[in-house]
Image (cartoon, rainbow, N blue to C red):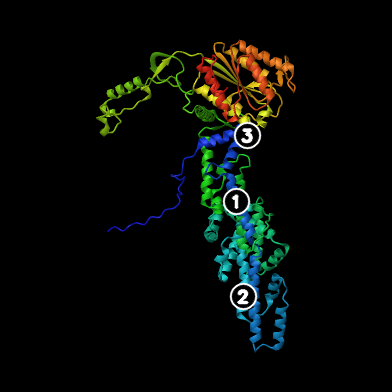
């Protein structure tokens, strides 16, 4: 009988998770576009999106918050006197054992006993001073002598562990041969570093060094530069740990250092090593310090490791902040993030990086002529589709049924058909399209049939299946319908932004632009903004237009631009859609300057009304979309609409897009004649 195989399951680590949900670029694009239309640059909007994250996906701010929490936890858990506490414990044990031995040693002369007891009783309170004073003491107790020797051994291992991680454990119970090997390591290392400083080292020197001492470097550096990087990072952390101690702690540690392994030469070599590393890597943080406030004491080696963790956390925090020029998600050190926060954080960071990469690679973001990141035409089309769908949903919601204004024929049926071509908007002739598909498949050779054998024989029989291809599709021809020249005039005075009307206005313009450019390509749409002055602009330019802190509602200038557009297309029927939240407070003077007064002057009102009359004489259908509840504005637009036989719509902000699109569709359905609108 075959032996059953046991299976173990874990996190997938060989690249992206194949079972992870697909990236939602639509959500990302919509979130970025909202910020762009609010006035952010595309680069900043992308950064803000990555900071916030997505639904169910942590953002950079969340990861950065966890980094800071981890940093605070390290500082609040530890203190830096772990080695001193361990030395004091060994010293107390040595003194206690020595006193016990003095009390029971009957061979000891009383005068000598008294002198020794007096010496032990009057040791300095400073642990370092006491250890130094006992350096020449002749221990009577063997356990006491061993405890005191452990102090020297501990100090040596801790000092080495500060420079070479793991050395404390590696040298536990080390003998003289081990200490000599360490001394040789330091000598060879300093020689290599000094040769490198003077430019006299070779690759062979490094290879020889690693062949001899490679076991001390688990980082496995590939060259001398990587070796220096690893050593300098830890040496700088050791210096920051020393800086973080109190003056008393530093003084005691320096005193104790001389007792390390009982070898002053060790301290000389370590001092030389630190000097070489500081000269080779002056950019490391050698002067920083931290404030520890916890209860868990840290030895020199472990404390240096914690200082390295803090430095790594600071580096990861800066990478997550993305606050420097040219920042990219690929800059984040995922290995460091995993060490500090675990694999879950790495998954979040990798997903955000994939989102950023996908947005750039999908062509939603592109570099403009000025080198700045911008929303691409593809992004604008996607946004228009999204906003138009929102408009359609709102229209459907108001009728209680499916909104049919965004679909249907573009004219009266002629009875003829034609083959489908890209951009065609006429409805299908379903019967002829199906018949074409059946004829094509019937004429196709049997060996060219892609259907499975089980379906191939019966596909033309009762219940058989066939496939329609684009070449089969025929469209119903319709009579040409009157084309429209549409001027959408949007108020860009500062009150629009101050009252929260900026984004709804932009969403409306983008949705209408998408509808006209994809559904009725024969129509012409002009987007005109009017603040102190008016100007025509493209949909992408309008989407990225920041809120302007300028006074003035120059509707007169906007109407002038609309007239200019209509005269360029004399065969089209003119439509004027005006979105505003204020009465006209500026007009264009004969010299081309904007003349502003508040409250509105009679001169401005007359100029605006006169221009409306000119548009009406051109046959324009004019609709005002009044935002806000200002009684003065309501009275003014009502009078102007009555004068030019236009309409006034007062939608809520959420319904602005639906109101504008509905009015445009209403005009087309009535061949630009009078017809009931959606809102009264």
| Quadrant in the picture for residue 499 | top right
Could you say where residue 209 lies in the image, as x and y percent from the top left?
A: 55, 58
Q: Which residue is mark 2?
A: 147
Could you say where residue 138 lies in the image, as x and y percent from the top left?
A: 66, 80
Secondary element at image label 3: loop
Q: Which residue is mark 1?
A: 67
Q: Which residue is mark 3?
A: 40
Please report whichever mark, 2 or 1, sits nearer to the chain's N-terminal start. 1
Please report whichever mark, 2 or 3, sits nearer to the chain's N-terminal start. 3
| Quadrant in the picture for residue 300 | bottom right
The residue located at (52%, 61%) in the rendering is 215
Please report whichever mark, 3 or 1, sits nearer to the chain's N-terminal start. 3
The residue located at (65%, 28%) in the rendering is 628
Real-space Cα separation, disc 2 to disc 1, in angstroms:
41 Å
Quadrant of the image containing the N terminus:
bottom left
Position of residue 131 relative to residue 615, above or below, is below
Secondary element at image label 1: helix
Q: Nearer the viewer, mark 2 or mark 1?
A: 1
């Amino acid at each position: 009988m075959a032996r059953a195989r046991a299976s173990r399951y874990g996190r997938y680590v060989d690249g992206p998770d194949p079972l992870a949900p697909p990236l939602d670029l639509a959500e990302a694009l919509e979130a970025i576009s909202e910020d762009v239309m609010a006035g952010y640059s595309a680069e900043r909007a992308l950064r803000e999106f990555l900071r916030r994250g997505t639904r169910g996906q942590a953002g950079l701010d969340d990861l950065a918050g966890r980094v800071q929490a981890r940093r605070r936890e390290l500082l609040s858990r530890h203190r830096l006197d772990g080695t001193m506490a361990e030395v004091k414990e060994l010293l107390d044990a040595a003194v206690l054992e020595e006193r016990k031995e003095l009390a029971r040693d009957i061979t000891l002369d009383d005068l000598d006993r008294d002198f020794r007891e007096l010496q032990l009783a009057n040791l300095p309170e400073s642990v370092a001073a006491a250890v130094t004073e006992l350096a020449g003491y002749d221990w009577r107790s063997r356990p006491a002598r061993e405890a005191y020797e452990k102090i020297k051994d501990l100090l040596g291992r801790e000092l080495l562990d500060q420079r070479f991680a793991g050395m404390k454990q590696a040298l536990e119970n080390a003998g003289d041969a081990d200490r000599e090997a360490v001394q040789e390591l330091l000598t060879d290392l300093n020689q290599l570093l000094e040769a490198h400083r003077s430019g006299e080292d070779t690759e062979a020197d490094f290879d020889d060094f690693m062949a001899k001492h490679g076991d001390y470097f688990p980082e496995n550096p590939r060259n001398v530069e990587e070796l220096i990087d690893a050593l300098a990072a830890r040496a700088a952390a050791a210096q920051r740990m020393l800086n973080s101690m109190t003056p008393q702690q530093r003084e005691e540690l320096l005193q104790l250092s001389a007792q390390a392994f009982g070898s002053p030469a060790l301290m000389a070599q370590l001092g030389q090593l630190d000097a070489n590393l500081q000269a080779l890597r002056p950019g490391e943080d050698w002067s920083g310090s931290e404030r520890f406030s916890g209860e868990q004491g840290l030895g020199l080696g472990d404390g240096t490791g914690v200082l390295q963790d803090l430095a790594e956390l600071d580096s990861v925090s800066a990478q997550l902040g993305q606050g420097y020029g040219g920042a990219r998600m690929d800059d984040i050190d995922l290995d460091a993030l995993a060490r500090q926060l675990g694999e879950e954080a790495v998954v979040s960071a990798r997903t955000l990086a994939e989102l950023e990469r996908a947005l750039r690679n999908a062509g939603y973001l592109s570099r403009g002529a000025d080198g700045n990141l911008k929303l691409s035409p593809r992004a604008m089309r996607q946004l228009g589709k999204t906003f138009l769908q929102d408009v359609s949903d709102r229209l459907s919601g108001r009728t209680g049924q499916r909104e049919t204004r965004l679909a249907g024929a573009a004219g009266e049926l002629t009875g003829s058909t034609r083959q489908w071509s890209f951009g065609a908007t006429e409805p299908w002739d379903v019967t002829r399209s199906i018949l074409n598909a059946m004829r094509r498949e019937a004429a196709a050779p049997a060996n060219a049939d892609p259907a499975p054998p089980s379906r191939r024989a019966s596909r033309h029989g009762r219940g058989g299946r066939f496939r329609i291809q684009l070449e089969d599709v025929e469209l119903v021809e319709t009579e040409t319908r009157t084309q429209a020249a549409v001027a959408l005039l949007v108020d860009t005075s500062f009150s629009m932004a101050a009252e929260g009307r900026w984004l709804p206005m932009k969403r409306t313009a983008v949705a209408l632009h998408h509808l006209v450019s994809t559904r009725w390509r024969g129509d012409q749409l002009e987007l005109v903004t009017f603040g102190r002055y008016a100007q025509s602009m493209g949909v992408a330019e309008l989407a990225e237009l920041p809120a302007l802190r300028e006074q003035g509602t120059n509707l007169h200038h906007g109407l002038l631009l609309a007239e200019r557009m209509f005269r360029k297309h004399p065969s089209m029927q003119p439509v004027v859609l005006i979105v505003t939240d204020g009465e006209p407070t500026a007009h264009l003077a004969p010299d081309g300057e904007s003349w502003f007064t508040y409250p509105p002057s009679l001169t401005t009102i007359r100029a605006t009304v006169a221009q409306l009359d000119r548009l009406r004489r051109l046959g324009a259908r004019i609709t005002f979309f009044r935002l806000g509840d200002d009684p003065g504005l309501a009275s003014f637009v009502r009078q102007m609409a009555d004068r030019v036989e236009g309409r006034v719509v007062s939608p809520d902000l959420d319904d602005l897009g639906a109101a504008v699109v509905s009015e445009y569709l209403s005009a087309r359905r009535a061949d630009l004649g009078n017809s009931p609108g959606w809102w009264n």
